[in-house]
Amino acid sequence: MPQYTQRPVLMQEYFNSDVELPYKLTIEEVKATINAVYDFLHDVNIFLVERGYSRLEDLLLGNTFAGILSEILIKNLSNYSATMVGNTRVGGYPDLIPRGVYLDDSTLQGTEGIEIKVSKQRGGWQGHNPEAGWVMVFRYIVDTETLPVENRAPTEIVEVLAAKLELEEWNFSGRKGTSRRTITASINRRGMEKLRANPIYRHPDYAVGMRRRE
């Protein structure tokens, strides 16, 4: 099987047994979710490649691929978690909410739950607005440059972080004048330090600000 359609393997020793998780979420539920994402990408990419198409990662723009990963992660966390469910409100906050708390599992601006961020960036993760509450960041690596394409590494989740952030742990960037730039809020250094101090899963080769394991 070509390298670029191979399925990554989660390493049990990279999970942090001392992690603080909210709403009775468990490491095993997060592990099952990531494995489901790997199964999805593996199956879809084999289907595409066998029919002469490129991998999903190579067909889509980076932000579109990240959006798909986010939706798959939220859907599977909802499926595997005994306590959390996906927010059914389109554009609602947060992405995952406690089961049975909101009518029809739908809320536009909830006060309980977990917001999911998916990014290939090492830090500076963004949202549309600063929000006080639990955030879970899934950091992934994607290879779209290696040639020939068959030698590209499969997409892999290398870090999963979680923390309850306060409003002051975000930096807000609004619009100025007639600017059409998207309004964004970025997690600041203090917030990133809080997230990095509570890893659920961390591949040592991609740990920011930490020495690699020998």
Image: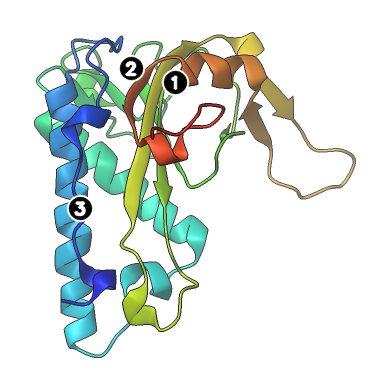
Residue 4, above or below 22 = below
Looking at the rendered image, the quarter that the N terminus falls into is: bottom left
Residue 132, above or below 143 = above
Residue at screen point 38% across, 80% down: 149
| Residue 147 position within the rendered picture, expressed as x and y whole percent measured from the top left | 45, 81
| Residue 69 position within the rendered picture, expressed as x and y whole percent measured from the top left | 33, 50
Q: Amino acid at mark 3?
A: Tyr
Q: Which disc is residue 109 wearing? A: 1
Rendered image quadrant of residue 95? top left
Tally of numbered discs: 3
Residue at screen point 71% across, 26% down: 172
Q: Which disc is residue 113 wearing? A: 2
Q: Residues within 10 Å of mark 1 (few under 14, many from 20)?
A: few
| Residue 198 position within the rendered picture, expressed as x and y whole percent measured from the top left | 40, 15
Which mark's residue is nearer the viewer, 2 or 3? Answer: 3
Q: Amino acid at mark 2?
A: Gly
User: Contact (CB < 8 A) between labels 2 and 3?
Assistant: no
Earlier sequence position, callout 1 versus callout 3: 3
CA distance for labels 1 and 2: 10 Å
Residue 155, above or below 104 = below
Earlier sequence position, callout 2 versus callout 3: 3
CA distance for labels 1 and 3: 31 Å
User: Contact (CB < 8 A) between labels 1 and 2?
Assistant: no
**Residue hosting label 3:** 38
Kind of element beneath mark 2: loop
The answer to whether residue 107 of the structure is visible from this angle is no
Kind of element beneath mark 3: helix
CA distance for labels 2 and 3: 25 Å
